[in-house]
Amino acid sequence: MLGACGDAATPTSSAAVTAGAGQAGAKRFDGQTVTVAVGSFMSSGVNMFKADWEKKTGAKVQVVEIPFGDLYQRLYTSFSTGAGEFDIAIYASNWIPEFAQANYILNLEKYYPEKTNWNDVVDKTKKLMYVNGQRYSVPLDGDVIIGYYRKDAFENDQNKAKFKAKYGYDLAAPTTWQQYQDIAEFFTGWDWSGDGKPDYGVLEAQGPKDVGPFIFSARAAAYAANPKTPGSLFFDPDTMEPSINNPGWVQALKDWIAIKKYGPAEMATYGGGTMRGNFVAGNYALALDWADVGVQAQDENSSTIKGKLGYYVLPGSKKVWNIKTKAWDESSEVNQAPFLGWGGWHGSVAAKSKVPDAAWDFLNYLDSTENSLKAVTTPGTARNPYRTQHFENPQLWADSPTKYMDAGPYLQVLKQSNSLPNTQFDLRIPKSGRYSEVLDNWVQQALAGTITPEEALNKAANDWKQITNEAGLEQQKKLYRELEGLS
């Protein structure tokens, strides 16, 4: 879903004043087995707490890892056929409205009075849990896409002088996508890292059936999320006509195709995990990712860039498409529209679960104050900050096993990205997983050069219309507007 900060206020309930870790892990569930479906990216963020919970409760946890690109379809198929194979599903918060409305997951309001750390969850993450004023998930992650740059390369006096001579402005973290492309071009093809090999200007996850649709949407937001027309990033909220083929999105796709030449050829195959591992190994000046790169860069077993990383809010644009006037709105100010892509990993209890109390208890244990901090400061968990505690005290990060070096600027960029006036949520209406799959399919063909950006996005928009009509246009429009905070 996309809406800027004008989305509806977080509902309240009698349980909302209680909260968080509660007595998770203190109850006994001897002889019970909790089966957890989770995307492969996130499995370590579950497995690291499995043994302790089993010891405390006498229950067992069976973790079923599902490839990231197959997660939506696998869960949808399991739920819709009533297979009852999972007790817990850990998935994108974007899918909560669909699964809740279809009664595939349990309303968790009866459990929330057990929680003692609910109020510490940041507001934008709280909003994602609600459907019709009721909570259907436990948050395990907070997602916003940010930029990374190599401080050592940017702060080098020779590099700064050469860059200014070529481009006419100072080398610094990019604030527009044009600057981002200039910087990527400048750092491509020569050994600025000093390791004896030519380096690259950029690394992004452009591979199919992975995180590509979210990275692409993050780029599009600057050109297509117009503050004058709130709720218009993905659809016209008055008609449900797709916005994804308008000139703003087309410009973003042209940019994404153009950036390919400043990264390795293999970038076209990289998913999020591969991209992160390669970026922290060195040789790339810029990257886009969730908070994961920042933590992974601290792991000295795999990273060569600890202490060399800078951070920035996603670049913006001085022109943004207006869906009502069918023209570009141009300004001397940069339109920044940080993107909460994927929305964060959330856990829900399956409606068909035969062990719902144990399933809730395990989710609650994953979300305890202590365990959540451990998870977000551990490389490779795919769990990013989502509690106030995670953002407010850089010393907690420095004292963690990761020993995060200078976490303050990292946390500040994450906080700012979550709180700018035009920060955009991801798409959350029912079938959001299908919309994403369709977009990825056509964008991949444009990246491969088999069709033009305009052709790709027109085909994607036509498919989106079909999905909307199948789901019910008026129903989709009603929920879309509600999620965007529109009357």
Image (cartoon, helix red, strand yellow):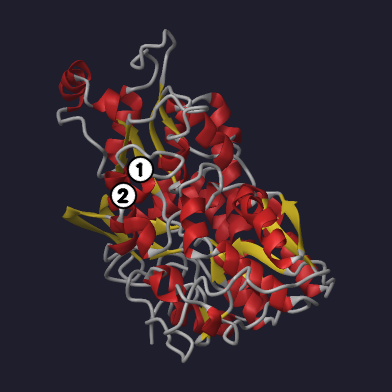
- How many tags in the picture? 2
**Residue 214: image x %, image y %?**
50, 52
Dividing the picture into quarters, in which one does residue 39 lie? bottom right
Give the alpha-carbon distance from disc 2 to disc 1, as whole Å.
Answer: 6 Å
Residue at point 39%, 27% (across, down) = 305
Residue tagged by mark 1?
Answer: 398
Residue 236 visible in the picture:
no
Kindly state the secondary structure of the residue where label 1 is placed. Answer: helix
- Give the quadrant of the C terminus: bottom left
Comparing 117 with 413, the one in front is 117
Residue 420 visible in the picture:
yes
Do residues under tags 2 and 1 come within 8 Å of each other at their CB atoms?
yes
**Residue 389: image x %, image y %?**
36, 61
> Among all residues in the image, which is located at the extreme bottom?
14
**Residue 163: image x %, image y %?**
21, 23
Q: Relative to residue 175, is residue 72 drawn left or right?
A: right
Q: Which amino acid does label 1 sit on?
A: Ala
Badge 1: few (under 14), some or many (20 or more) residues near its Cα, within 10 Å?
Answer: some
Q: Relative to residue 431, is residue 239 drawn left or right?
A: left
Residue at point 57%, 39% (across, down) = 273
**Residue 48: image x %, image y %?**
62, 50
Comparing 168 with 218, the one in front is 218
> Among all residues in the image, which is located at the extreme top?
196
Residue at point 30%, 68% (across, down) = 325
Comparing 83 with 247, the one in front is 83
Q: What residue type is labelled 2?
A: Pro
Residue tagged by mark 2?
Answer: 394
- Give the answer, above or below, for where 393 lies relative to 487: above
Kindly state the secondary structure of the residue where label 2 is placed. Answer: helix
Residue at point 42%, 69% (across, down) = 121
